[in-house]
Amino acid sequence: MVDLDREVAGIRCREVLELLSSYLDGDVTESEKRRIDAHLLECDHCLRFGRDFAEAIGALRRELRRSPALDQDVARRLRERLAKE
Amino acid sequence: MTEADDQRLLLAASQGDRAAFDGFVRRHEDAVFRLLQASASCDADAEDALQEAFVAAWKNAGSYRGGPSARAWVMTIARNALRRAHRRRAGEPADFEPIGEMGLQAGWGRDEALEGLARREVLERALGALDGEMREVLTLRDLEGFSGDEVAEMLGISVAAMKSRLHRARLRFVSALREVAHG
Ligand SMILES: [Zn+2]
């Protein structure tokens, strides 16, 4: 049975989960970072989920960042509209 | 082209220089439309807002004073145009599902590996499964690469609220990815 309220290395899984984005963005305090690092060493659930989470966001950034250019018709209609101003 | 170039283009545009404004449009129209597509419920709304935003940018070029980047400035105008278009429609319900629940749905504590990460169409479908607000914050932060402060300013919310919305959006994205890839 998995339990989000299990405490490992002084921090519960639920709190790690809440801080995951901030942790990835380098936006946690030094003490939060130390506790999360220690938690991840001992908690398989959070380690695995954290890795999946980071990989999913990484893939999103990598694969979709270069989105296709504006449709030519959309671009043309924008210029027609602006020409009226 | 840099931020300083944008400032020059807008200054020239404010004095009636059409070619300068065309240059400004070319520089930002793709990104602005991507954002609007991410937020709007249909492409027609996104296109209307795109036109309205650049018309407003043309008329108000003289009021751009720097501060946020010029792209952030025109995106803010575009979002407001879209919001005006939506004002009369029912809004999406605010999503305050607890983070723990969202984590479980996203696969915390489960053994199945996450699949489909290298497949663009899977990622696109997962992104498309999010609601407008979530897609918007993910697009701005993770695809367009704006800083957290810039995104908060563009969305008109506090940095803390932006972070919370971003985290929820990312968790929902992982859930959607599992559904799309496995389902
Ligand atoms: Zn844990």
Image (cartoon, helix red, strand yellow):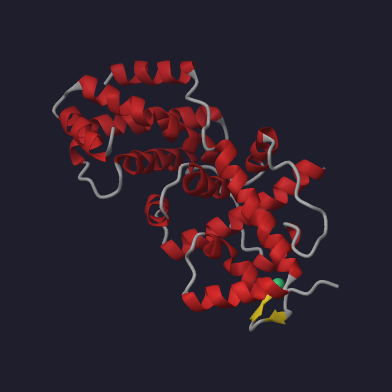
The residue drawn where x is 70% and y is 81% is A7
- Location of the C terminus of chain B by quadrant is top right
Residue A66 in picture, x, y percent from top left: 51, 33
Q: Position of residue B156 (x, y in %)?
A: 39, 54
| Camera-side residue of A4 and A9 | A9
Q: Residue B102: image x %, image y %?
A: 69, 61
- In the image, taking residue A48 as reference, residue B58 lies left or right, namely left
Q: Nearer the viewer, residue B51 or B122?
A: B122
Picture residue at 76% right of the left edge, 45% below the top: B115
Q: For the view shown, which residue lies furthest in the left direction?
A: B15
At horizontal 59% and vertical 53% (from top left) the residue drawn is B169
Left/right placement of residue B14 relative to residue B56 reads left
- The quarter of the picture where residue B54 lies is top left
Nearest the eye: A81 or A69: A69
Answer whether residue B151 is visible to the viewer in this image: yes
**In screen coordinates, is B8 left or right of B104?**
left
